[in-house]
Image (cartoon, grey):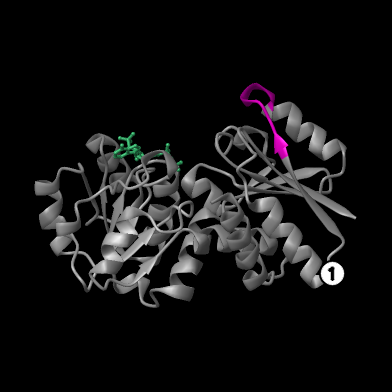
Amino acid sequence: MQVLGVIGHPIDHSLSPQMHNAAFQAVGRDALYVPLLVQPDAVQTALAGAKALGFFGLNVTVPHKQAVIPFMDHLTAEAQAVGSVNTIRFENGRMYGHSTDGPGFRAALEQKLITDIADCSFLILGAGGAARAIAAELGRCGAHITIANRTAGKAKDLAYEFAHSEARGMGLDPHELSRAMAAVDVVVNTTTVGMHASRGESPIPRDLLRPDLRVVDIIYNPQETQLLVDAASLGCPVLNGIGMLVWQAAKSWEFWWGVSPPTEVMEAAVRSALSSME
Ligand code: ATR
């Protein structure tokens, strides 16, 4: 049996064990995926332990995605581009680090909402780790990107670092945003606004939205954030974070085994886990 897991702190909330184990069962893969609580000062020891125990692979979640990097023997181009690792493969005593966050986001978008990413103009709300992975991927596709963040300086730094020369960063002030919004096709929320603690809040006012805008929120709990409720009420095509969650996991399978999992099984496992939490 192959053993895999996800390291993070906290880890109880992770839906990855349900997703992967459901997919293993569906395709008859002899593997087990476990949640592993790892303290921030124990990352190196945990990696060495997983290697010694013969783990086949790991996922890495908050707050360890940057911390694991110095211990990798090899980093993929995607991991290097975003400076974070969410997937590790152990092979011949070596650790290979990869990031599937950006590719997972792109795959979800292409599956469910947008086929012409390169021709679209995106407004990314937020400038944290998730925005970083998404900006890197959209930039790689050649999309036009504007990044808006509560701390405007972080948006400007990220825009400068990842997107092509036309990209720019700005604050979340509605007056500043309204002009930028008029020129974009897709809005992507990567901020934490709208998650459980701030349920009912949206990172942008409803009156900045318009029906021809496509609106993505990478939050999946709740499945319908206030931003998506507002957008859907205007008739905007919308997408929540379940697709990105599933597809980053699917891209991990590709990195571990070179095969694609049954994503519909993973998605059903996520939906069932989320509904039992509500
Ligand atoms: P992740 O790794 O999931 O992207 P993160 O790195 O903690 O998470 O980033 C959280 C993002 O949500 C940041 O862009 C943060 O803005 P700041 O850079 O100004 O901190 C944004 N965010 C969090 N709370 C917010 C709020 N109440 N209003 C607006 N933006 C918020």
Residue indicated by mark 1: 28
Indicate the quadrant of ligand 1 in the picture: top left
Quarter-of-image position of residue 198 = top left
Quarter-of-image position of residue 44 = top right
- Image check: 274 left or right of 258? left
Percent from the top left, x then y, of residue 35? 72, 42
User: Would residue 125 be counted in the magenta stretch?
Assistant: no
Q: Residue at image x 9%, y 48%?
A: 175
Query: Which stretch appears magenta?
Result: 36-42
- Image check: 51 left or right of 9? right
* Viewer can see residue 122: no
The one of 274 and 205 positioned closer to us in this rendering: 274
Number of disc labels: 1
Quadrant placement of the N terminus: bottom right
* Viewer can see residue 128: yes
- Image check: 239 left or right of 274? left
Mark 1: C-beta under 8 Å from nearest atom of ligand 1? no
SS label for mark 1: loop
Quarter-of-image position of residue 140 = bottom left
Q: Residue at image x 49%, y 67%?
A: 108
User: Would residue 41 be counted in the magenta stretch?
Assistant: yes
Q: Residue furthest bottom?
A: 115
The one of 181 and 257 positioned closer to us in this rendering: 181
On screen, residue 88 above or below 107: above
The three-letter code of the residue at mark 1 reads Gly
Percent from the top left, x then y, of residue 71? 67, 34
- Image check: 272 left or right of 230? right
